[in-house]
Amino acid sequence: MSNCLSGNEAVAYAIKQINPDVMGAFPITPSTEIPEYVANYVANGEVNTEYVTVESEHSSMSVCIAAQAAGARSVSATSSCGLALMYELLYVAASCRLPITLACVNRALSGPININADHSDSMGARDTGWIQIYAENNQEAYDNFLMAMPIGETPSVRLPVMTCMDGFITSHAVENMELLETDAVRKFIGEYNPENYLLKRENPLAVGPYDVSAYYMEHKVLEAEAMKAAKARILEVAAEFEKISGRSYGLFEEYMMEDAELALVLIGSSAGTAKAAIDKLRAENVKAGLVKIRVFRPFPGEELARALAGTRAVAVMDKSEGFSANGGPLFAETRSALYDLKVRPYLIDIVYGLGGRDVKTEDIEKVFGRLADIAVTGETQPVYTHMGQRSKEEIA
Amino acid sequence: MSTVYNLKREVEKPARLTGGHRLCAGCGAGVIVSGVLRALNKEDRAVVVNATSCLEVSTFMYPYTAYMDSYIHSAFENSAATCSGVEAAYNALKRRGKVEETVKFITFAGDGGTYDIGFQSLSGAMERGHDMVYVCYDNEAYMNTGIQRSSSTPRFARTTTTPIGSVGQGKKQNKKDLVEILVAHNIPYVAQTAPIGNFKDLHTKSYKAIYTEGPCFLNVLSPCPRGWDYPMAKLSEITKLAMDTCVWPLYEVEEGVWHLSYTPKKKLPVEDFLRPQGRFKHMFQKGNEWMIEDAQAYVNQKWERLLEHTGA
Ligand SMILES: Cc1ncc(C[n+]2csc(CCOP(=O)(O)OP(=O)(O)O)c2C)c(N)n1
Ligand code: SF4
Ligand SMILES: [Mg+2]
């Protein structure tokens, strides 16, 4: 069925169709609408989810951890400071191997406080052991949320999944999109039947030990192995999802990459802008292309290296500032992935869109212009720059 | 079951906290946990929740758990939210026919995890009304990290963050009255107790807390020979002195009605409780008499206030 929904409503609708056991609910712009929609589903008897109106995101994640450990499917939604407040518990969730699903509606982190989109919130959580899947638009936000549980709950994976979409740009924009029938969704998701859980009658379970050095490392290696195993599972679930939806997903999306000489690597809604710019450049015979990263954790390093192997110059566009003084997080991953190529493209990093700073097709064209120069001259300096920031004179 | 307390019958129940845990000899925490869990009806299951604390690191060190029941520890500051989550899962799974039997939810956290860092989580869980019991075993400092002050530490007590020096005289502030704050949450049952005598008070209050529907709170005195600096064999002596000096009164508040559980035959001076403990040693130095006077005045004031509440 075809519908007009905002990104938030699309995710809320996915939650309604899944009818999870437990939801931790706490407001923060721009994800607030998700728990609001679900509250209405509960109030109207459309779901019988245990809807826990906690006093903070910290408790929201704590509730999800405990409920999932107890044998219940748990979900939550948050943004920015809310995700940051969960930080310690994100590690707990992953290390206890609890496949919670969290919708992260990306928003800049304080300070200064800012409610608009960038990826600094979820990028800050990139090393917590959560699978991270990013959406370009409402359709993908919905689809990714539906795929999260079959990925996370698989015995070889058992990791929590964060599905991300850009605040306002995706969460609040209303778009035409396809929804699946609820029966099809329920069949696709299946029942949650963990092997061990707190409320299992036959066998009590203890979760969250004090772990000594003699065991801790083994546990961390198991977690790392699970993250590696997630890659194959993500593709498997995507293939199953294609059968019921007709929509196909990979670890990333390649746009005009077959013969691309100049390419961008980026995440999220800016892909739409980049595609429009590429169409224009292609009409001018510029061999431009795009890799839109969908799965950031596990990071598809080898696959990305293969996709970029034939290019001459690549710009990574980071929608968060990592403050590493060495480029943003996506740049670090991409540069590392390319290292093993015998012949590598030139590589630069452009940090853009912080705190909701707009990016237009002209901005993207300028990046390609710079890549064209680099392809000829080999001059990549400065490797790491910021796009669209104004000079002191302009601000004054 | 018979409601008349019988210690012999109670201790014949299979232990739910087994021996072999790593708490210090003479630690109040183990006695309290066994005592509270013993109040569960034999046929009922429980999920035990811990906040990070001496108790947690001593009773669930991988790969050994001392608990016969299911158990979860998540972090220091979120044990009440964690218990809420287990209870929420129980409600959901029961509604959906996936769990049938009765399961009770009991959280144990130290004073640091309750009065301080877990305070918000506790308040939230109590306000939401989860059917759970929250037990604070109050040893009046952060013991697990090496005896730092908490808002439960009494005035003048020496801790590693309120040391005694040429200027420093131990903790400057009085102990936070957490029980009153919990009473203000208008929850069905709030009580203060201690592992004393034949454990009747602890048992009866635990039973009420476990089998009263809704959120219930117990504050339990948990002497710590390490942190309080007294010989470990003196657990019951110290506990008794805390009660007889009215430093730690036993009382309960049921549906808003206060009730005093114990009145000392003879109210002892506060110094009887302070003297055996190294953490109060400086109070007995010459020139520091005012500290003992202040401590006594504070205990008197709190005790009078309690008597007003209970109408005793
Ligand atoms: C967020 C966080 N801060 C600090 C700590 C370190 N820490 C662990 S246990 C503890 C003290 C526990 O004190 P309390 O709750 O009174 O329990 P006790 O050990 O005294 O029984 C501290 C400070 C932690 N684990 N997590
Ligand atoms: S330090 Fe104190 S609270 Fe901790 S285990 Fe030892 S006696 Fe118990
Ligand atoms: Mg303590």
Image (tube, coloured by chain):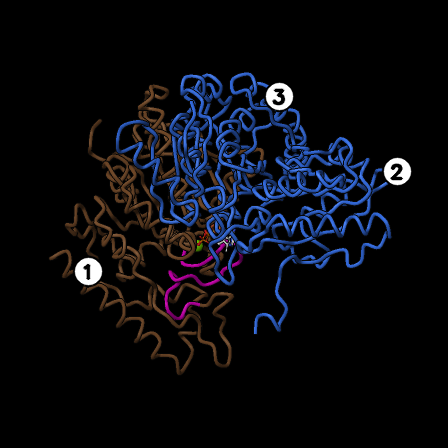
Chain colours: A blue, B brown
Can you tell which mark lies on residue B306?
1
User: In the image, residue B44 lies at what x, y percent?
Assistant: 32, 26
Give me the C-alpha separation between circle 2 and circle 3.
30 Å
Give me the C-alpha separation between circle 1 and circle 2.
79 Å
Marks 2,3: beta carbons within 8 A = no
Q: Secondary structure at mark 3?
A: helix
User: In the image, residue A137 lies at what x, y percent?
Assistant: 52, 37
Tags 1 and 2 both on a single chain: no
Residue at the spot of label 2: A342
Q: Secondary structure at mark 2?
A: loop
The residue mark sitting in front, 2 or 3, is 2
Under mark 2, the amino acid is Lys
Q: Residue lying farthest front?
A: A284
A215 relative to B206 in the view: left or right: right
- Tell me the magenta residue range: B139-157
Is residue B57 in view?
Answer: yes
The residue mark sitting in front, 1 or 2, is 2
Residue at image point 26% right, 30% down: A44
Under mark 3, the amino acid is Glu
Camera-nearest residue between B147 and A329: A329
Residue at the spot of label 3: A236
